Image (cartoon, rainbow, N blue to C red):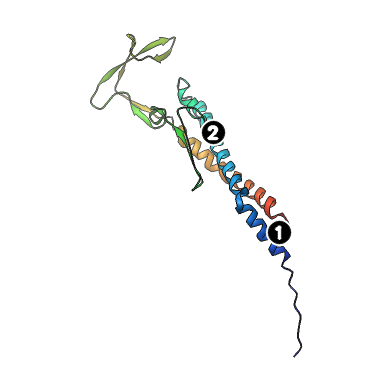
Amino acid sequence: MDNFDVTVDLSQIKVFFGRVQQAASGDFKKELELFLEGLGYEFLRILEDEIIRKKVIDTRLLLNSFQKGNENNVWIFNDGKLSLEVGTNVEYAAYVNDGHWTCKKGEIGRFVPGIWEGDKFIYQKGAKTGMYLKQQWVEGRHYWESALKIMETIYPKFLEAKLEEWLKKYFREFM
């Protein structure tokens, strides 16, 4: 029986695992955090666009609350799980999105203090003037669901492009 010498070049495997180690050592995690933050900013932009597109009547408090750094904004990033939570602390945001009754259950109407400027009503707590609202359902504008639907449509494209970028950056020699 003849002996055969087999030579295996493991240099590519060593390079590959070196790249994996480099990516895992922090570079990739930092890039992933930036990517998530970018997604958060994109969602806020889409949300603001939907509030404007759906003609949500607002004093700009709601619209401005969907900006990172605004006191009414919710922007939570959990590093351990790499999760991002985006939202608003504006009390009436859910009513505008989901819809609401103009009065509490059992009330036939209520007085809302404020002033009229032309055909626009401006709420002013404690004002002696205002308007009387009869009990009725106000349909929600559903801007949140609309923004989520848009984000769900574009997210796969963002992720695919980002994954391709990361593969080229860390594993170019193997592609």
Q: Where residue 55 appears, x then y in whole percent?
A: 48, 24
Q: Looking at the image, which is closer to me, 39 or 79?
A: 79
Q: Quadrant of residue 173?
A: bottom right
Quarter of the rendering occupied by the C terminus:
bottom right
**Image spot of residue 41 (x, y percent):** 55, 35
Q: Residue at x 60, y 53 (%)?
A: 24
User: Upstream in the sequence, badge 2 or badge 1?
Assistant: 2
Q: Is residue 124 positioned above or below 144 on the image? A: above
Mark 1, other Cα within 10 Å: few <14 / some 14–19 / many ≥20 = few
Residue 20 position, x and y percent, is 64, 57
| Other residues around mark 2 within 10 Å, as few (<14) / some (14–19) / many (≥20) | many
Give the number of callouts. Answer: 2
User: How much space separates mark 2 and mark 1, taking CA atoms?
Assistant: 37 Å
Q: Amino acid at mark 2?
A: Ile
Q: Assign a secondary structure to mark 2.
A: helix
Q: Which mark identifies residue 46?
A: 2
Residue at left offset 41%, top offset 14%: 122
Q: Secondary structure at mark 1?
A: helix
Identified at 53% across, 36% down, the residue is 43
Res 11 quadrant in image: bottom right
Q: Which residue is mark 1?
A: 174
Three-letter code, disc 1: Phe
Q: Is residue 8 above or below residue 62?
A: below
Instruction: Give the image location of residue 26, x and y in percent.
Output: 60, 49
Could you tell me which residue is drawn at 61 percent across and 52 percent down?
A: 25
